[in-house]
Image (cartoon, grey):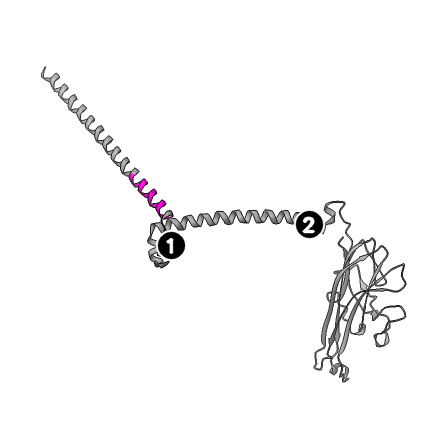
Amino acid sequence: MAVSVSLQCLGLVTLAAILLQTIAVAVSFVYFNKVLSTMQESFSRSSVSCLINTNLHSHFEDSAEDKKSDPCWQVTQQLHYHIEKTMADRFQKEITTAMRDKLTGVLPDLRPGVRGDPLPKVAAHVTGVASSTEPPTADGSRSSRGYLGERIRAWEGQRGLSFLQNMELRGGELLVPRAGLYYVYAQTYFRLPSTEETEETREEGAQLVQYIYKKMSSYTVPILLMKSSRSACWPRGQEPGLFSLHQAGTAFLQPADRLFITVSNASSMEMDGRASYFGAFLVG
């Protein structure tokens, strides 16, 4: 009988301890939850008040260290950073789209093969070889053939840096295969000997001129397309004088038109393929 009473007392004590522990946990949970809610609400009010009641003048007057330690300043700085980043990304995307749309309307005009059949590859680049020119014309006057300067006939069209693609090289002339707008270019390189090399005294400078001509089958006189010139003084030291003339431009050419180059001082030309060359290619 005494054992039964002891067991009942132990059970009541255990049940009471469990109830007390449960009540303590519940009270602690309610308390900490209330404290957390209060802190969250206080932080929210503080953040909103930073955005609404920010005193710009006080921020400008504060030192850099004070700003960094101020929670309101940190909140506004983070917000400003995210706003600026979002606006910059959107602006970049809109500008990129606008530029792409703008270029889409322009590029087809620059690349006519996009809308219709692609343009054939018509191009040539010929380089200088051993000099071979017609006799010079006295005083640079127009020769009986109808062009100025001395004609350059020795061009290489197959070896080295030169090439011919759907164009022909005949007697120093490039033969145009089809009508269209062509980009034409030329460079000539001159080596003027020094007075010590020639043992001559020259008081006047040299006039270097380069011409690009077009010859048409329907017209007997060649047509001057471009002209480039410069005045060069004869070198007086031991080293020769080195000069180059370069010019380029576009011209509308017809089938069977021919392009050729003349210069004023062919005897002084350096016919290195990397220094003296000319060519053309179809652009439209």
Residue 204's quadrant in the figure?
A: bottom right
Residue assigned mark 2:
107
The image position of residue 280, as x and y in percent, is 77, 59
Q: Amino acid at mark 1?
A: Leu
- Is 220 placed left or right of 205 in the picture? right
Q: Using a 10 Å C-alpha cutoff, classify the residue at mark 2 as few (fewer than 14 neighbours), some (14 to 19) or many (20 or more).
A: few
Q: 10 Å neighbourhood of mark 1: few (<14), some, or many (≥20)?
A: few
Relative to 241, 79 lies left or right? left
Magenta stretch, overall SS: helix
Residue 109, magenta (yes or no): no
The answer to the question of whether label 2 and label 1 lie on touching residues, with beta carbons closer than 8 A, is no
Q: Is residue 125 visible?
A: no
Closest to the observer, 5 or 62: 62
Q: Position of residue 212 (x, y in %)?
A: 80, 65
Give the vertical position of 108 relative to 196 (above or below). above
Quadrant of image for the N terminus: top left
On the image, the x and y values in percent for residue 72 come to 35, 50
How far across and how far down the image is residue 33, in percent? 28, 35
Label of residue 56 in the image? 1
Select label 2 or label 1 by which is in front: 1
Give the answer, above or below, for where 277 lies relative to 268.
above
The structure residue drawn at horizontal position 70% and vertical position 48%, both measured from the top left corner, is 108
Extent of the magenta region: 38-50
| Residue 4 in view in this figure | yes
Q: Is residue 216 above or below residue 32?
A: below
Q: Which residue is depicted at the point 51% across and 50% down?
A: 88
Task: Give how far apart the Cα atoms at labels 2 and 1 are.
Answer: 50 Å
- Name above or below for residue 221 compared with residue 166: below
Q: Earlier in the sequence, mark 2 or mark 1?
A: 1
Hey, what amino acid is under mark 2?
Answer: Leu
Circle 1: element type: helix
